[in-house]
């Protein structure tokens, strides 16, 4: 089982769209996939037409394997299951702070269902916290969407700095440019500068700023299912291929 976290310490960069589309692509490739939504807003579940289990509280998520398993729902797509979030997930950090081995609890919870899946994709909330430290420890790969703008550049720098300060393996970080508008000189200049500065961290794929991605909320489905020939769909397939090759080479 491989765990792929879609994470950024900045909100509004396309984490959920990336999580949903990557999970779909892995399932289409024949993998058994669990999309685990850790963001209490529950957008991943919404995109895939799945209602959250109100009985899966923060305590049961980390301590009750039976309840954790029962909260998993099948999606409309073969091979893709979803563990939807609910509002009690906002209390994860408070709960984790009281636990022993608090930075390993997420990995332990995910391993309880690991035998049923080849890949677990985590849709993560945007912050530095005890939960994010759990994510960094549990994940085999951390996919980071970065809008080519000043604020996103700064937050990525903070993320790399956090990894350095806490002696976390930066090789887990796989960043890509999201919501790219190639007509904007600032976007082009920022991408060039960041690729030079973080040469080993950035993937080749760039996901464009596209109306088809925004329409995921309307269709409540991955982009490839309703706009399969669009630039956005092609970008997500390319992103999947890069990540899959990275997982294979890491074995």
Image (cartoon, helix red, strand yellow):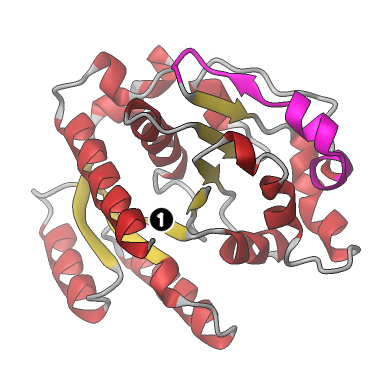
Question: What residue is at 39 percent from the left and 40 percent from the top?
Answer: 18
The residue that mark 1 highlights is 143
Q: Please tell me whether residue 91 is drawn above or below residue 48 in the rendered image.
A: below
Q: Secondary structure at mark 1?
A: strand
Q: Please tell me whether residue 33 is drawn above or below residue 155 in the rendered image.
A: above
Q: Please tell me whether residue 28 is drawn above or below residue 18 in the rendered image.
A: above
Question: What residue is at 36 percent from the left and 63 percent from the top?
Answer: 250
Q: Position of residue 160 (x, y in %)?
A: 44, 76
Residue 65 highlighted magenta (yes or no): yes
Question: What residue is at 32 percent from the left and 55 percent from the top?
Answer: 248
Q: Position of residue 188 (x, y in %)?
A: 12, 61
Q: Is 170 in front, or is 192? A: 170
Q: Position of residue 131 (x, y in %)?
A: 69, 59
Q: Is residue 100 left or right of residue 142?
A: right
Q: Please tell me whether residue 71 is drawn above or below residue 117 in the rendered image.
A: above
Q: Can residue 178 be spotted in the picture?
A: yes
Q: Quadrant of the C terminus?
A: bottom left
Q: Which residues are magenta?
A: 59-78
Question: What residue is at 22 percent from the left and 30 percent from the top?
Answer: 233
Q: Position of residue 10 (x, y in %)?
A: 48, 57
Residue 183 highlighted magenta (yes or no): no
Q: How many marks?
A: 1
Dividing the picture into quadrants, the one containing residue 173 is: bottom left
Q: Is 251 in front, or is 83? A: 251
Q: Is residue 103 left or right of residue 95?
A: left
């Amino acid at each position: 089982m491989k765990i792929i976290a879609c994470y950024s310490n900045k909100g509004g960069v396309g984490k959920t769209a990336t999580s949903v589309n990557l999970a779909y692509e892995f399932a289409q490739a024949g993998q058994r996939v669990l999309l685990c939504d850790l963001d209490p807003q529950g957008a991943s579940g919404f995109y895939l037409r799945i209602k959250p289990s109100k009985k899966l509280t923060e305590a049961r998520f980390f301590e009750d394997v039976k309840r954790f398993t029962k909260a998993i729902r099948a999606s409309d797509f073969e091979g893709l299951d979803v563990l939807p979030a609910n509002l009690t997930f906002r209390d994860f950090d408070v709960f984790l702070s009281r636990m022993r081995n608090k930075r390993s609890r997420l990995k332990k919870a995910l391993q309880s269902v690991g035998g049923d899946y080849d890949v677990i994709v985590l849709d993560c909330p945007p912050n530095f916290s005890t939960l994010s430290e759990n994510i960094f420890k549990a994940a085999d790969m951390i996919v980071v969407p970065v809008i080519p703008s000043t604020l996103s550049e700064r937050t990525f720098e903070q993320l790399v700095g956090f990894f350095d300060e806490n002696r976390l393996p930066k090789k887990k970080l796989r960043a890509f440019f999201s919501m790219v508008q190639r007509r904007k000189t600032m976007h082009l200049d920022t991408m060039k500068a960041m690729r030079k500065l973080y040469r080993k961290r950035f993937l080749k794929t760039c996901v464009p700023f596209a109306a088809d991605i925004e329409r995921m909320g309307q269709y409540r489905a991955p982009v490839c299912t309703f706009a399969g020939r669009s630039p956005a769909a092609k970008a997500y397939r390319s992103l999947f291929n890069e990540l899959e090759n990275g997982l294979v080479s890491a074995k």
